[in-house]
Amino acid sequence: MSRQLTDLRLLYSFSLAASMAKNLRERDVMTCRSCGNEERASEGYPCADCGTFVCIICNFRGVTLCKSCHAKRPEPPLTPTNSTKIDWPEH
Ligand SMILES: [Zn+2]
Ligand SMILES: [Zn+2]
């Protein structure tokens, strides 16, 4: 019973995705919210914070946030904090 329901949902989401892909092919260009370039939407990634379009070139550079979200964050969360400051008393 439940398996049949899942199959129906899968079929529905599949047809929905197919129609969305058809729409995208007509206008597959979006402005990257990080670098401002117009890139293919199907090759880009959503911003990790707000889900807006960030192009694949920015993703290659390690940018996962759009400009405004990046500005909101003083430090990127993925950067390791390897500060060389040693809390050692001088003798
Ligand atoms: Zn970009
Ligand atoms: Zn964002």
Image (spheres, rainbow, N blue to C red):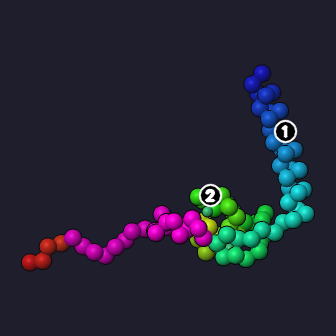
Residue at x 68%, y 61% (from the top left corner) = 52
Q: Which mark is residue 11?
A: 1
Seen at 34% across and 73% down, the residue is 83
On screen, residue 14 versus residue 32, left or right, reads right
Instruction: Say which residue appears at 91% left-offset and 63% top-offset.
Output: 26
Image quadrant where residue 3 sits: top right
Amino acid marked by disc 2:
Cys
Magenta segment boundaries in residue numbering: 67-87
**In this figure, which residue is indicated by the disc labeled 2?**
50
Task: Name the foreground residue: 3 vs 57.
Answer: 57
State the predominant SS element of the stretch in magenta.
Answer: loop
Residue 60 can be seen in this image: no
Q: Quadrant of the C terminus?
A: bottom left
Q: Residue furthest toward the top?
A: 1
N-term-proximal mark, 2 vs 1: 1
Residue 80: % across, % down: 43, 68
Residue at the image position 60 percent from the left and 70 percent from the top: 67
The picture places residue 33, in percent across and down from the top left corner, at 67, 69
The percent position of residue 41, horizontal first and vertical second, equals 78, 65
Dot in front, 2 or 1: 2
Quadrant observed for ligand 2 in the rendered image: bottom right
Pick the quarter of the image with the N terminus. top right
Q: Are marks 2 and 1 in contact (CB under 8 Å)?
A: no
Left or right, 80 with respect to 37, comes to left
Task: Provide the secondary structure element on which disc 2 rests.
Answer: loop
Describe residue 70's horizontal placement relative to residue 43 as left or right. left
Of residue 47 and residue 12, the one placed in the foreground of this image is: 47
Q: Quadrant of residue 45?
A: bottom right
Q: Is residue 23 visible?
A: yes
